[in-house]
Amino acid sequence: MIPSELSWKDSFKNGLRSIEQVNQFFNISLKEMHFDNLIPLHLAYRIKEQGLDGILAKQFLPSNEEIADHQEDGLNDPIGDQNFSRPGQIIHRYKNRALFLPTTVCPVVCRYCFRKNELSNNDEIFKSDFQKTLEYFENHPEIEEIIFSGGDPLMLSNEKLESYLNSFSKIKHIKYIRLHSRTPISLPQRIDTGLTEVLKMYANTFETLSIAIHVNHKEEIDADVTAAMARLREIQSLNLLSQTVLLKGINDCPNILEDLFKKINRLGIRPYYLHHPDKVKGGMHFQLDIKAGRIIYANLRDKLPGWLIPQYVLDIPGGYGKTPLFNPEALEFSGVLINYKSQQIKL
Ligand SMILES: *Cc1c(COP(=O)(O)O)cnc(C)c1O
Ligand code: SF4
C-alpha cells in the first residue's frame, strides 16, 4: 500500500538515491551507473504497485540498458544548450523568449531526460548568479517571455519562486511567464496551498502565466495527480499546457496518445507539444525513427479534433531549435529539416 500521508518534503527527502537502495526496494539487480538516480518515496510505491513492466517503471526506474554499448551514439548535450548559454542561468535561442534555469534539482530522474548528462555533472549552464540574470533580462527588451526550466522549477520553495516572479514583474517588457514542470506527476503533493497562492497572485500580474506540464501516459495520472491538477485549475487565468515526449515502449501508439490527450482535456490542460525523443547518451533505448513518429502523428488527425492535437516537434541537435516534424508530403524522412531561421539542417 502507498503511504498516502507522506508529505512532499518527506517523499523527496526519503527518496531512493542510490542503485543499492533501488535494488533493495524493488528486489532487482541493477549495475552501478554514473547517472543520477532519484525516485521520491511516494512514486517508488506507485511504481511497485503498477509493476516493473508498467509505464512508471519504464520511465523512472534505472535500467542496465542505460550503460549498454549502443548508448555511445547518444550526445551529452543533444539540443545544443551550451551554444546559447548566457550570463546568469539563461539559455537565449529565440529572440522573444528565453529559458531561466534556477535549479538543477528534479524530484525524479526521467531516464530519457535530455539533460541527464548535464544535470549529473552539474554543468556550467547552471552556475547561479541572479544579479547577472536580472541584468541580462533588463538589457534585452526583445525578451517578452521568461520560461522557468531546470531541473524542475517547482522544486524551488514558494518564497524563492515568489521572489523571482516579483523581480521579473518589475521588468516592463516581460509579458509572459511560463513554468515547465513534471512535479504534478512526479510529486503531486508539491502543488500545495502556498504554491497556488503564489500562482494566484501572479496570474494577473503578467499578461499570461502558464504551466506546461510534462505528462506522457494516462496511467501517470492517479487520484493524487488529478487532485493536484484540480488545485491548479482553480486558479483563474492560469494557462495550463502539456508537453509529451514520444517514447518507444511507452506511448508510441496513436491509441495511447488519444487516451492521454482526452484525459488531460478533462483536467483542463491543452496539449501543446509532442516531442520526438532527443538523442541523449543513456536514453537511446527510447528512440524511434522519424518515419514511425510521422505515421503515429498522422493517425491522430482521425481520432482527435485539431485543438486536441499537440505540435509534433524535434529539437534539432546542435542548437538549431525546435522544428515541426510532420511532413504532409511524405512519411519517409529525407534527412534534412528546416529550422526557425530557414536554415536547412542535415541530421
Ligand atoms: C523549447 C525552448 C523554448 C520554448 O519554446 P516554445 O516554442 O515557445 O515552447 C525557449 N527557449 C529555448 C532555448 C528552448 O529550448
Ligand atoms: S522532469 Fe524534465 S528535467 Fe527533470 S528529469 Fe524529467 S525530463 Fe529531465
Image: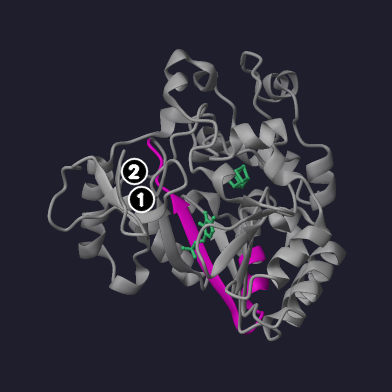
Please say whether residue 345 is visible from this viewpoint. Answer: yes
Please say whether residue 48 is visible from this viewpoint. Answer: no
- Counting from the top left corner in percent of width and height, residue 196 is at 75, 72
Q: Residue at x 43, y 34 (%)?
A: 279
Residue behind mark 1: 256
Q: Amino acid at mark 1?
A: Ile
Q: Residue at x 84, y 62 (%)?
A: 160
CB of residue at label 1: within 8 Å of ligand 2?
Answer: no
- Counting from the top left corner in percent of width and height, residue 159 is at 87, 66
Left or right of residue 122, residue 162 in this image: right
Vertical side of 262 occupied by 28: above or below: above
Left or right of residue 287, residue 28 in this image: right
**Residue closer to the observer: 92 or 177:** 92
Q: Residue at x 12, y 56 (%)?
A: 329
Would you say the residues marked 2 and 1 are in contact, meaning their CB atoms lie under 8 Å apart?
yes
Whether residue 239 appears in magenta in the rendering, the answer is: yes
CB of residue at label 2: within 8 Å of ligand 2?
Answer: no
Q: Which portion, as a residue range, is magenta? A: 228-248
Q: Amino acid at mark 2?
A: Asp
Between label 2 and label 1, give the one nearer the viewer. Answer: 2
Residue 342 bears which disc, if any? none
Residue 144, quarter of the rendered image = bottom right
Left or right of residue 151, residue 302 in this image: left
Residue 42, quarter of the rendered image = top right
Q: Quadrant of the C terminus?
A: top left
**Residue closer to the observer: 311 or 110:** 311
- Counting from the top left corner in percent of width and height, residue 264 is at 48, 65
Residue behind mark 2: 252
